[in-house]
Image: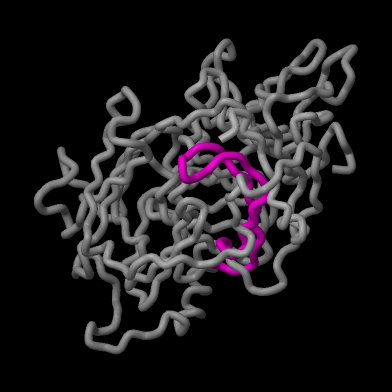
């Protein structure tokens, strides 16, 4: 791997008319969506893959609890076990009705970032005083999902990585590779391009397309096989995933909706994410995306570690993204058998699919701090220059994925929200700069102040 991990562009992506814009290191005024320190403007976002990035074994441990099989305490009404299985496609109207009901339902969340949470969909589902009793409440099995290696990190919570997996619930057919025309992580096979590049917005598909089918890789740097680097995708879809779940085994997804609302069902619970919000689904977590119409947005994927809040330094305790504004779903489950439920996983840059006979969203209770979460960008506390000149765009960092080199990030997620600019004797747009990190910028809404036509 080259030490200065420059993003390479998936040239085929431009054939789909899908991106917003990629700005190389020799860019003029910064625009919104960047790659490395990720920075964005006017509700845009950026990320810049940095040079000299190294693998960071970050983690957050979490425990999930699953049901044993169908039991009287957990099961909902269903047909007799002897009744013939109804093909999943016959439940199409039921799935649409369920997705519509979810879009109208007010969801509940837990508040905090990196906190140790505990939540139950059934009272007393979490065992008292231990993680793996001989018999769990309600006949559940314990399973622990780890976000890092067993020995990763020095603090106690970073070592809670023991996996307790119920094989009976994990019974599925073998994974088989499936093709995806526009998902491509093989940057070593593409010649780099140092020029500034720009795309028009990606078209919403005219044919029925779900979240996974609508993924398009735009650019990136690094290699998922060694868990090093980051990559930018967009998604453009117009239908829900139905009886299917997606799992990213390569890294974490930071999802930035630009058009349309995402109803995201995870093993931990449900989130609703719309434009001007972000959602992070971390590696290994299965999730399903339901939509109510044309939907589009950006995805920043990081391979090395996990996103954390930036160090505030002299800012003190309050400022930028406050931990209490991050929301994690409460436990929610469905006890539903399905003839051929599809589990799609992204592994080393390729997609694989396996079939199983039940919904994976059967987690009755969980505790821990390795969780999916969302954040509303309107809650970002903006700090800015008040006398003269411009502060560096890092002052707008929402989340960062650090590397093992101090002061260097795998990617920073930064926004340029509406704010007062009161500096005197100062050229209004930010200064031109040549950045050691590459920038990917995308507009969510509004106008970019340094380039009105963006």
Residue 246, image x and y in percent?
A: 47, 59
Q: How many numbered discs, if any? A: 0
The magenta-colored residue range is 211-240
User: Which residue is farthest left?
Assistant: 134
Residue at figure coordinates x 18%, y 58% from the top left: 138
Q: Looking at this view, is 181 or 204 the one in front?
A: 181
Q: Quadrant of residue 157?
A: top left
Majority SS type along the magenta span: strand
Quadrant position of the N terminus in the picture: top right
Residue at figure coordinates x 16%, y 40% from the top left: 130
Q: Is residue 415 magenta?
A: no
Residue at figure coordinates x 61%, y 40% from the top left: 221
Q: Is there any visible trace of residue 130 in the rendered image?
A: yes
Quadrant position of the C terminus in the picture: top right
Q: Is residue 229 magenta?
A: yes
Residue 295, image x and y in percent?
A: 66, 60
Q: Looking at this view, is 164 or 65 the one in front?
A: 164
Image: 171 above or below 436: below
Residue at figure coordinates x 53%, y 58% from the top left: 263
Q: Looking at this view, is 57 or 188 the one in front?
A: 188
Residue 319, image x and y in percent?
A: 59, 22
Q: Is there any visible trace of residue 256 in the rendered image?
A: no
Residue 364, image x and y in percent?
A: 29, 56
Image: 426 above or below 177: above
Residue 285 shown left or right of residue 78 in the figure: right
Q: How is the image coloured?
A: one colour
């Amino acid at each position: 791997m080259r030490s200065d991990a420059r993003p390479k562009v998936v040239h085929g992506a431009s054939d789909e008319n899908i991106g917003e814009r990629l700005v190389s290191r020799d860019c003029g005024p910064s625009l919104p969506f960047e790659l490395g320190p990720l920075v964005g403007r006017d509700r845009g976002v950026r990320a810049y893959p940095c040079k000299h990035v190294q693998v960071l074994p970050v983690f957050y441990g979490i425990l999930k609890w699953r049901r044993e099989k169908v039991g009287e305490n957990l099961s909902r009404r269903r047909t007799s076990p002897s009744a013939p299985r109804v093909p999943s496609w016959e439940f199409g109207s039921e799935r649409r009705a369920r997705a519509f009901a979810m879009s109208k339902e007010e969801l509940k969340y837990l508040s905090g970032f990196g906190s140790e949470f505990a939540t139950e969909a059934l009272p007393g589902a979490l065992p008292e005083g231990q993680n793996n009793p001989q018999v769990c409440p309600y006949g559940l099995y314990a399973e622990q999902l780890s976000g890092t290696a067993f020995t990763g990190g020095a603090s106690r919570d970073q070592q809670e990585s023991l996996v307790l997996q119920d094989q009976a619930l994990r019974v599925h057919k073998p994974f088989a590779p499936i093709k995806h025309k526009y998902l491509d992580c093989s940057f070593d096979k593409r010649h780099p391009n140092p020029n500034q590049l720009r795309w028009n917005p990606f078209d919403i598909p005219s044919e029925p397309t779900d979240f996974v089918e609508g993924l398009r890789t735009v650019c990136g740097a690094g290699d998922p096989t060694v868990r090093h680097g980051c990559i930018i995708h967009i998604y453009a879809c117009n239908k829900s995933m139905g009886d299917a779940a997606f799992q990213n085994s390569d890294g974490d997804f930071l999802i930035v909706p630009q058009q349309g609302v995402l109803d995201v069902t995870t093993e931990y619970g449900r989130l609703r994410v719309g434009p001007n919000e972000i959602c992070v689904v971390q590696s290994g977590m299965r999730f399903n995306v339901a939509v109510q119409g044309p939907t589009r947005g950006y995805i920043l994927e990081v391979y090395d570690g996990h996103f954390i809040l930036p160090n505030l330094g002299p800012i003190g305790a309050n400022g930028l993204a406050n931990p209490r504004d991050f929301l994690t779903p409460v436990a929610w489950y469905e006890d539903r058998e399905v003839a051929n439920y599809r589990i799609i996983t992204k592994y080393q840059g390729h997609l694989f699919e396996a079939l199983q006979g039940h919904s994976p969203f059967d987690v009755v209770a969980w505790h821990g701090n390795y969780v999916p979460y969302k954040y509303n960008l309107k809650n970002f506390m903006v700090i800015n220059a008040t006398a003269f000149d411009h502060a560096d765009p890092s002052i707008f960092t929402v989340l960062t994925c650090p590397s093992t080199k101090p002061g260097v990030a795998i990617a920073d997620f930064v926004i340029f929200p509406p704010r007062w600019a009161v500096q005197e004797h100062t050229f209004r747009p930010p200064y031109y700069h040549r950045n050691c990190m590459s920038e990917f910028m995308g507009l969510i809404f509004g106008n970019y102040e340094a380039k009105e036509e963006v």
